[in-house]
Image (cartoon, rainbow, N blue to C red):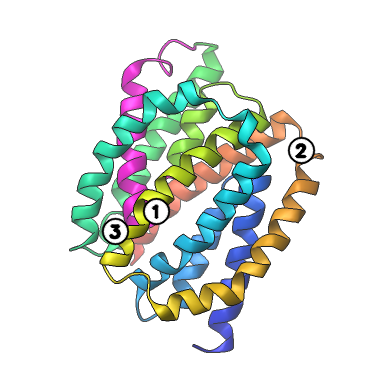
Amino acid sequence: MGWIGYMFGVVSALLIGVSKTAVPGVSILGILLMTEAFPNNAKLGVGAVLPVLLVGDVMAVLRYRRYGQWDRLVRLLPFVAIGMVPGLLVLSSAEKNELRPWIGEVVLMLLLIELGRRAFYSERVPRHWWVAAVAGIAAGFSTMIAHAAFPVMTVYLMSQDLSKEKFLGTAAWFFLILNVTKLPFYAGLGMITAETLRFDMWIIPALFGGALAGYALLKWINKRLFDGLALTFAGATALYLILSSRVG
């Protein structure tokens, strides 16, 4: 792997660190950059980013663990488990680009629900059980095939009217559980190898730098800006998933 690949990896780890501690959503850019570090094997790129995400999850949990809202997670996790099953089956046989438009369309649907709630001051529809079901299944499916659960979870957690600390704490526990669950499956599919682990060891220091920057940045971001950034990244990611698959 050349220096350009390592450059992509360092920037990816830096962005993941910032996303875990301050600005949810920039991690999706990091994940996309990691796939560029492995241009000849996109699945290896998806596998390589998982240990980096796990280290970031642990850091986020240590920082925001007391803010986690377990009542929100308990109603969501059973549906996530359901979504992970077809995600695993598809991951073992399909290219992830084939699935991008499905994920993007689900995210856009949830985003429109949240924007409608905010426009009409209605909490009734987003709090309904079927929203948790759709969000959970979509998150489970998308996280298994491409670590793409962030935009789904952003829209779901935004609908819960959480403070930025509670958002980050709940998301930290959620993604730690998901990513630990995925680890043996990715290893079994050959997506995590000695090569990817060596690569991760070189770039993980950048993750710590991004996390420290995130801790400092969060103090300067108010709730309105935090929500706006999270939803903007969710929408942009959804559009990217849909359009990039058509262009490709």
Type of amino acid under label 2:
Ile
Relative horizontal placement of residue 180, taking residue 89 as reference (left or right):
right
Is residue 142 inside the magenta stretch? yes
Distance from the alpha carbon under mark 2 to that under mark 1: 27 Å
Type of amino acid under label 3:
Phe
**First in sequence: mark 1 vs mark 3:** 3
Name the residue that disc number 1 marks.
241
**First in sequence: mark 3 vs mark 2:** 3
Badge 1 marks a residue whose secondary structure is helix
Type of amino acid under label 1:
Leu
At horizontal 56% and vertical 57% (from top left) the residue drawn is 55
Q: Are marks 2 and 1 in contact (CB under 8 Å)?
A: no
The prevailing secondary structure element of the residues shown in magenta is helix
- Magenta range is 123-149
Residue 8 visible in image: no
At horizontal 59% and vertical 39% (from top left) the residue drawn is 230
Q: Are marks 1 and 3 in contact (CB under 8 Å)?
A: no
In this view, which residue lies farthest toward the bottom? Answer: 2
Is residue 110 inside the magenta stretch? no
Name the residue that disc number 3 marks.
185
Name the residue that disc number 2 marks.
221
Q: 90 or 77: which is nearer to us?
A: 77
Q: Quadrant of residue 248?
A: bottom left
Badge 3 marks a residue whose secondary structure is helix
At horizontal 29% and vertical 38% (from top left) the residue drawn is 81
As drawn, 142 above or below 6 = above
Badge 2 marks a residue whose secondary structure is loop
Q: Quadrant of residue 11?
A: bottom right
